[in-house]
Image (cartoon, rainbow, N blue to C red):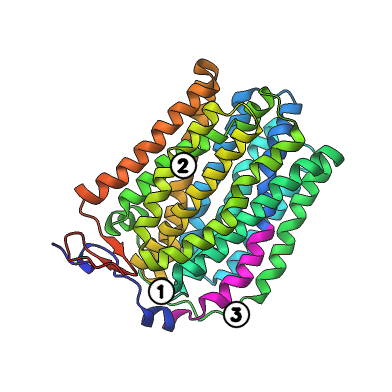
Amino acid sequence: MDSIHSRGYPSATVDENSQLQPGGRRRAIPLAASSLFVATAVGGLGLIVQLYLKSLDTPIFLISLVATLNSIGMLLGSWLWGTVSDYVKRRRLLVFLTLGLAGGIAGLISLPSTSIVLATAVPRFLFFAGIGTVAIAVVSASSLVERRGKNLSYISSAKAFGFAAGSAIAGIVLDRFGFSLAFSLAAFLPIVGFACLWLLPCENPVRPKKRLGAWKAIFTSGLLDLYLATALRQMAIFGTFALLYIYMESIGIPIILMGVLSAANPSTQVLALLAFGWLADRVGRRRIFMLGFFVSAIVPLFFVFATNIYGMIAGYVTLGFSFSSLYVGSTAHIGDRVPPHRQGQMLGLYESSRSLGGLFGPILAGVIAPVIGFKGMFMVMAGIAALGFMVMMLGNTVLGRRITVGDKPIATGDKQSNR
């Protein structure tokens, strides 16, 4: 059996973390505040954009294409800015990305044509992807192993709360004030998040390091199966939700309730992320993220039978639990495997794998929904999510990948001891 170090990155140690960027919690709190405002802006944007395009009589396929374009921005932005963050001052980079997002949303205030909305989708989410990736890289690299899951959960929980608030507010603001004011509010919130970044502690000087290509980083990290399974899971989830607002309208759910219903997902995440972050530090990362993969396969099935408000709520709440366990467990697992000076790149590649699934899921949904109906489309997405779960099961068994028991990374086949 190969040793851990010979098969990829050595695990981050207390000394490395302490020397590079001590104080994970001191960085997590201002970043959580900034993430809250940014997520609030983006959380309501999906509802507003979908319904705005519908008001322009945009074909359903083009409406579903927006989610795909968003995913392209997430795919490119996560990889690009995650890698860049390993070589520059991360606070400065966050300032640039946050202001860039505000400018990208502000372009919608004038209520442009469908073509302009589609054309500007990628740049908006290029900035948004970088904000999330760089924030978790800062916290992960500055956290001790036994506190990494909890510290990361502060960021993800704040984002979840922001998405919940944004989803709930968007429907109300849109119903009462119209599209222009709704876009104006969404553009203002990232500016508030920008102000929070000045509370971050000063950074140490950036240390020179050897450049490492993305593909080589993936194949030498022992994380290939996690990235692949995540892409499949996201393909299913993004495909399920790409046309869900349209489906809700078709079964008679009022517009003003759509945002409130969708807020059940991030609302569930607020506490679930904190709970799973605490558990990930105590029972091991793998048990937590495997639960997320399993529950994800159940999520689309709720909408097969959801013909009323209660069924929708059940689906959104289940999604919240699945994401919480998957995201906290996976990011903490990556942080255990990768040294601090490479975490921007590897966490960025993880976010890119999530976006890769989002790239194809909405396209598939837009193609098959008119042919087999919404419920048939939901069944297909459930099967894709189940495939992602199987990839993780087989990846651990067949590939002999490293797993985490408690806080310490070990090689498969080594003697295991649970804390």
Separation of marks 3 and 2 at Cα, in angstroms:
34 Å
Q: Which quadrant does the C terminus fall into?
A: bottom left
Residue span colored magenta: 19-37
Which callout, 3 or 2, points to the residue nearer the camera? 2
26 w.r.t. 393: above or below: below
- Residue, far front: 310
Which residue matches tag 1?
A: 146
Residue at the image position 70 percent from the left and 42 percent from the top? 260
Which residue matches tag 3?
A: 201
Labels 3 and 2 touching (C-beta < 8 A): no
Residue at the image position 48 percent from the left and 22 percent from the top? 376
Separation of marks 1 and 3 at Cα, in angstroms:
22 Å
Q: Which of disc 3 and disc 1 is earlier in sequence?
A: 1
The residue type indicated by label 3 comes to Pro
Q: Main secondary structure of the magenta part?
A: helix
**Residue 21 relative to residue 415: left or right:** right
Labels 2 and 1 touching (C-beta < 8 A): no
Name the element at disc 1: helix
Residue 285 disc label: none
Does residue 173 show up? yes
**Residue 336 relative to residue 200: left or right:** left
